[in-house]
Image: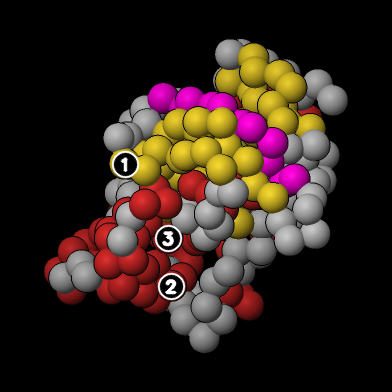
């Protein structure tokens, strides 16, 4: 599904965020990427999202070289990806329903689909009763569940979860991980970055460890080892 072929990313100060990375992520895989700050995890995700371009090498989504897509095709490509971040990135003046509906509107989905799909995904993340609440009326865990619902509502092929539990307590962390596992069982590829050892060890899924822009370990059913 996703393939990095000898990818390097060098910034203007000559620092190497990625150094000759080769990595393949299969369809419907759940993979965790771990490493200390500065290891290259965020840069790797930005390349998948086409927010950055590699200095050398290629990144493929299926058979498409992401960074050779014309600007007009990038929007279509990004619709295949749902992204979840540590800071939620919800629109503060919109309710939970409206935040998710807005993502559908941007994708050109019709009103009847929005009316049907938004309540469905909110139920899926156990927030059916918080549909009309604004972000300031939600707990941190609830905000992240709205963000997950927003990420999955357009039925993407891939979910990128970048430190999704970084601001959450252990109970909410557990709930978010269970939702990500549920999404994965429905056939979606999931890429998770996290510093949470307990999360990684509980998943028993593939773990890729990065250090100084390189992959130093790739375990099919790994644990958090740094």
Q: Secondary structure at mark 1?
A: strand
CB atoms at circles 2 and 3 under 8 Å apart? yes
Q: Quadrant of residue 105?
A: bottom left
Q: Secondary structure at mark 2?
A: helix
Q: Quadrant of residue 197?
A: top right
Task: List x then y, in percent, for residue 80.
Answer: 33, 50
| Quadrant location, the N terminus | top left
Residue 150's label in the rendered image is 3
Question: Which of the two labelled residues, at mark 2 and mark 3, occupies the earlier sequence position?
Answer: 2
Magenta span main SS: strand
Of residues 105 and 51, the one nearer the viewer is 51
Residue 209 belongs to the span the image colors magenta: no
Marks 1 and 3 sit apart, C-alpha to C-alpha, by: 26 Å
Report whether 214 appears left or right of 27. right
Report whether 75 appears left or right of 46. left
The crowding category of the residue bearing disc 1, from other C-alpha atoms within 10 Å (few below 14, some 14 to 19, many at least 20), is: some
CB atoms at circles 2 and 1 under 8 Å apart? no
Residue annotated with mark 2: 99
Q: Residue at x 56, y 48 (%)?
A: 54
Q: Secondary structure at mark 3?
A: helix
Question: Which of the two labelled residues, at mark 1 and mark 3, occupies the earlier sequence position?
Answer: 1
Q: What span is colored magenta in the figure?
A: 16-26
Marks 2 and 1 sit apart, C-alpha to C-alpha, by: 31 Å
Residue annotated with mark 1: 64
């Amino acid at each position: 599904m996703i393939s990095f072929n000898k990818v390097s990313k060098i910034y203007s100060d000559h620092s190497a965020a990625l150094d000759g990375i080769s990595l393949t992520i299969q369809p419907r895989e759940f993979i965790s990427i771990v490493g200390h700050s500065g290891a290259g995890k965020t840069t790797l995700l930005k390349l998948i999202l086409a927010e950055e371009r590699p200095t050398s090498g290629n990144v493929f989504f299926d058979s498409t070289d992401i960074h050779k897509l014309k600007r007009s095709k990038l929007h279509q490509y990004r619709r295949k990806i749902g992204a979840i971040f540590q800071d939620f990135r919800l629109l503060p003046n919109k309710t939970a329903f409206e935040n998710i509906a807005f993502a559908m509107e941007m994708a050109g989905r019709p009103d009847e689909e929005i009316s049907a799909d938004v309540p469905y995904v909110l139920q899926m993340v156990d927030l059916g009763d918080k549909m009309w609440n604004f972000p300031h009326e939600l707990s941190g865990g609830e905000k992240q569940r709205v963000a997950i619902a927003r990420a999955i509502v357009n039925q993407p092929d891939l979910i990128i979860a970048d430190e999704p539990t970084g601001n959450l307590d252990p109970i909410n962390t557990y709930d978010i991980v269970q939702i990500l596992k549920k999404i994965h069982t429905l056939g979606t590829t999931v890429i998770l970055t996290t510093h949470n050892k307990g999360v990684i060890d509980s998943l028993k899924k593939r773990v890729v460890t990065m250090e100084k822009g390189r992959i130093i370990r790739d375990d099919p059913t790994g644990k958090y080892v740094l």
